[in-house]
Every structure is written in C-alpha cells, then in structure tokens.
Image: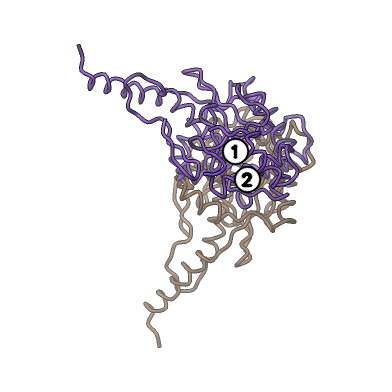
Chain colours: A purple, B brown
Amino acid sequence: MSSVKDEIEKANKEAVERMMDSEPVWVDVGIAREKLPEMKDYLLLHAGPPITWEKASGPMRGAILGAILYEEWADTPEEAEKLVTSGQVVLEPTHIHNAVGPMAGIISPRMPVYEVYDKKYGNKTYSNFNEGIGKVLRYGAYSKEVIDRLRWIESTVAPILQATIREIVKDRGGISLKSIIAQALQMGDDCHNRYNAATSLLLKEVTPYMIDSGFDKQTIREVYSFLAGNNFTTLNLGMAAAKAMTLAAHKIKYSTIVTVMSRNGTETGIW
Amino acid sequence: MSSVKDEIEKANKEAVERMMDSEPVWVDVGIAREKLPEMKDYLLLHAGPPITWEKASGPMRGAILGAILYEEWADTPEEAEKLVTSGQVVLEPTHIHNAVGPMAGIISPRMPVYEVYDKKYGNKTYSNFNEGIGKVLRYGAYSKEVIDRLRWIESTVAPILQATIREIVKDRGGISLKSIIAQALQMGDDCHNRYNAATSLLLKEVTPYMIDSGFDKQTIREVYSFLAGNNFTTLNLGMAAAKAMTLAAHKIKYSTIVTVMSRNGTETGIW
C-alpha cells in the first residue's frame, strides 16, 4: 500500500499535467443570464471569496452599486445600497460559477460574457468584457459615463463580437487562447498587467471576421478602435483561459495544489 | 586649424546624430512611375550596386523577367530577356532613386510603392509592397501566380492602402515608423527577418481607417487577411524608414560612415 505522501505526489503530478494539457478555446459571447447556468436576477458575482456589504471595500461597494444601476434594479446609489443591505440583491463569488473578472470582478445578469471551452476536459468558463482604463466599474466607478459605456458594450460591442466568434467557430472551431498567450509571453507580455502583444495577436485573428460580421462599417470601426485602443482587451479572455486550465486540476483527490487564489479587496480565498 | 582626424570625428558624429534624429513617417501609397521622380518606362530598379544581365544571378534574372512580364513589355520570358540584353530595358539600382526593396528588390514603373517622408530632414524614400513568402518575384519566381498576385496587389491592395494612409495623414500626419520599430524590437522582432510584432502593431494603427476606406467589406477583408497573414508586410516600410534614416547621413563632408550596404546577388555595394 502506498503512503499518503506517494498519493499526494501522484495527485499533484496529475493536477499539473491536467493544467498543462487543458486547451482553452474562446468559443462564444453571450449574456451572463443565458450563459452561466446558475445566473439569475438580483444576483451579482464578485471577485474573491464570499463577502458581505459590511466587509466590502470602497471599490467593491462602488462596483456593486454600479452594477445595480446598470441593471436598472435601482435608480440611485442609495436605493441600490438598500437592495444589498436588505439581502434582495445577493452576492456570490464568480469562481463558484466558473467565471472570473478583473479587480472587483462584478458580473451581473445582463452583462455580456466571453465563453471559453476547454477542448481537452470539457469545462466551460466565463469572463466579462474589459471596459478599458480610467473610470471603470471594476475599480468601483459608477458615474453615468461608466454605466453608459457598459450599456454600449452590451448593445454594440457584444453583438459584433458574438457574430465574429460564431463565424470563427464555424470556420475553425474558435480561438486558441494558449497559442496567443504563448506567443505574447515571448513578446514581452506578462499576460497579467501587460497584454499588448496578446491584444494585437488576438485582433489579427478576429478582424477579418469582424469586418465581415454584417454590421455597418462605422460601428465595426468604433468597436475595432475600442478593442485595439485598450491593451487590456485580451486580459479577460486570458483570465477565463486560466480559469479553465486551473479548473481542470480542481478536486483531484489528495492533490495539495491550490488551483485558485482570488481576493475580493478585503480577504483572499483559496480553492 | 583642426586636423583631418578631428574633421572626420565631427562629421561622423553629425552623421550618427542625423540618422538618430531622422523621423521617417509613412505618408502615402502611389504608383512608382508617379512617385519616383526619375522613374520611367522600360526602367527597372534592382537591389545593390549596378549590374548587367550577364553578371546577374538566377533569382535576379528571374525577378527582372517577371517584372517585364508584369509590365506587359513582353509576352514571354524569352522576349523579356531580349529586351534586357538589347539594352531596351535599363537596369538601375533602387538606391539612386531613394528606393529600396527586399531580395532582388525589383521596382518597375507600374508597381505600387510606399512613400516615407522624413519629417526632420525632408527626404522622401520608397519601397515596393511585400508579396508574402513562397513563390514571389523578389526571390526570382515569375510564374503566372506570381504575376497575378502582383496585379492584384496593384489593383486591390494598393488602392485600399492609399485611401487608408491618406485618411491617416489627414487625421494625424501619417504613421511614425520609428515608434512601431522601437516597440517591435522590444517585442522580439529583429526588424529584419522577423516583423511579427511590427506587423501586428502597424495593423492596429491602420485597421480603423481601412474599415472605413470606402471599399466593399469583402475586399477589405481580403486585403486585411493578406496583410495580416504575412508577417513581412511591414518589412518594406521598415526598409524605407531605414533608407530615410541613413539618407539623412549621406554626403556629409569628411564622414567615413558607410550609410548603405546593399547587394544585388552578385556583388555588394557601399555608399
């Protein structure tokens, strides 16, 4: 009979192998409510381990309020706060929904999400869209321009990217994110806070399909410029890819490898 | 009175400074006959120092024949060769026309060229378009597919890039090639035989304008895919930029710095 140490080593080896063998491919864009199996009205997903309003940091609170205004569940930040403190709006970690998001990581039901499919292990993971830098929801901003941009992403960016990725899937099965990340790492990106090469490489893949996506040229140009003008465009896809890879190594009996470390601005959780 | 050595050192310092201060900007696309001041019918420009048909290597000969077929000065390679050996078609180095081209470097009158303008010193330099890899004129291939591709570049790629760069010039003066090259060098390109990052970065700059260039979407998609599918797309612009930078240091009295080294497949010339 093998010792527990042997079991752990074997399990950890398997965990690492599964992470490395995972093949995350961007395959779709959809609305969170339709894509995430457990998503529902009055549910907000957030980064890190479970948190309450009382313990939430300023930026996390701001992002929660912004998402409620974006969803039109409330008209003012004050009303929005009451919905959370009264328990009408429920907060859950993105990770238990196989989803991820940068910073506050808020995903609300009507937000568009990327769907990433692990061709090797069959898992599906999700991330929201990147808003750019400056005043953005993920840093806790919820002024009108932030909400307006989120609505424009929903009404304009998401439909074009949905049509684009669906044509790519028909043609060649999707966009291999490991291939883009592997190249980008050799081109100076860290694929955490620098996604310049990755975003350029991703755009080279999707642009032919985007041009031909059936939308008018002016709108395509605006969406292209938005995506190309933000080097963090590919961050959220990279995060969903990382989620898929680590998910492949989740729940392996005896494995002591931590597959997720994620913070909510107050505490860090491990899975 | 200063010594000749002092004069040389001063001149060389000036040469280097002028090369570094040069600001090559891609400003236009046009047809060689219209853009290059001394270009004319039955004149072919080639890489390196002056060469005769007799001394030309196989690939250089092939490229010369291909250019004559492309120009429709002859219908067969045999007729084309006679035009050169009889002296009806004249061969001159690209460099005396402030132009450059990779490998055989053939530029013929009806070929589209990039125009690069040195904002600092006022020089204009030129390069032909990159055809991709495989069977291409610059390596001496002149089969039907090579000539057809050159004609498609002339009829389809060049007009779209011309409309695109002219909009960019109106909007922001052109595309700074030093900026693209500087970034690309930090992203793993050598900007000689690897232009992957440079091509991605260039495309990010031009694509919004290309989408809006007034051509139909299918054609834009084809042209985008051609440019994005060839990592050497930016090579020819990089060469024209290098030509502009070195030209800024040309003919400085007492300077011993060689500003051009270029080969024609048989011999190497220096300027």
Q: Quadrant of residue A91?
A: top right
Q: Is residue B203 visible?
A: no
Q: Quadrant of residue B72?
A: top right
Q: Residues within 10 Å of mark 2 (few under 14, many from 20)?
A: many
Q: Position of residue B74 (x, y in %)?
A: 68, 34
Q: Quadrant of the N terminus of chain A?
A: top left
Q: Which residue lies under the disc numbered 1? A: A106
Instruction: Please give the name of the residue rendered at 69% of the width and 32% of the height, measured from the top-left corner.
Output: A110
Q: Does residue A139 sit above or below B18 in this rendering?
A: above
Answer yes or no: are tags 1 and 2 on the same subunit.
yes
Find numbered disc 2 in the image and state the secondary structure of the residue it sits on.
helix
Q: Position of residue A229 (x, y in %)?
A: 63, 47
Q: Does residue A166 sit above or below B178 in this rendering?
A: above
Closer-to-camera residue (A260/B79): A260
> As shown in the figure, which amino acid type bears the numbered disc 1?
Ile
- Total marks in image: 2
Q: Position of residue A269 (x, y in %)?
A: 43, 36
What is the residue that sits farthest to the bottom in this orientation? B1
Closer-to-camera residue (A83/A243): A83
Closer-to-camera residue (A148/B3): A148
Q: Which residue lies under the disc numbered 2? A: A137
Could you tell whether B248 is left or right of B190 in the image? right
Could you tell whether A30 is left or right of B235 in the image? right
The numbered mark 2 sits on a residue in which chain? Answer: A
